[in-house]
Image: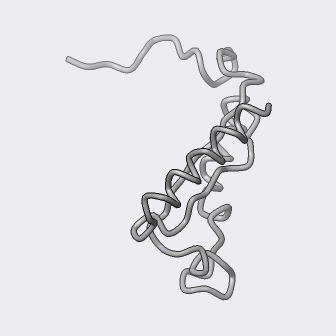
Amino acid sequence: MSAPPQHVLTYGSTGTALHGKELLLAVSPGALGTNYTREGGFRYQVTDLLRPFQATSNLIGTRFVMSFVTAGAMTISEADLAARAREYADDRLDE
């Protein structure tokens, strides 16, 4: 039988295991970036769609870092994907 943990290390009044750590999301939505604008097909920016993750970050005490977004994942070329991977690595290694 499965049961929830008795002691939670990550959140709540006594959970501090993640406090002060960074939370960064690397997301790759399938649609083109032009869809993720107020005027685009979805009427929301990717940052709007990630708000629940930002709220969770606040709850668990992490520092929410601007997400790394690679839109158009359904049609991205291998070369462009490799370039984005390098950009991500360069961005994260600079900090």
Q: Is residue 24 above or below residue 27?
A: above
Extreme left residue here? 1
**In which quadrant is the N terminus drawn?**
top left
Q: How many marks?
A: 0
Q: Is residue 75 above or below residue 57?
A: below
Q: Residue at x 65, y 40 (%)?
A: 24
Q: Position of residue 35 (x, y in %)?
A: 57, 80
Extreme top residue here? 7
Q: Is residue 87 above or below residue 48?
A: above
Q: Position of residue 73 (x, y in %)?
A: 45, 64
**In which quadrant is the C terminus drawn?**
top right
Compare residues 64 and 1 and report the one nearer the observer.
64
Extreme front residue here? 79
Q: Position of residue 34 (x, y in %)?
A: 61, 80
Q: Is residue 18 above or below residue 34?
A: above
Q: Residue at x 62, y 65 (%)?
A: 46
| Colour logic | one colour
Horizontal side of 94 relative to 33 (left or right) equals: right
Q: Residue at x 77, y 24 (%)?
A: 20
Q: Position of residue 54 (x, y in %)?
A: 68, 47
Q: Residue at x 73, y 22 (%)?
A: 19
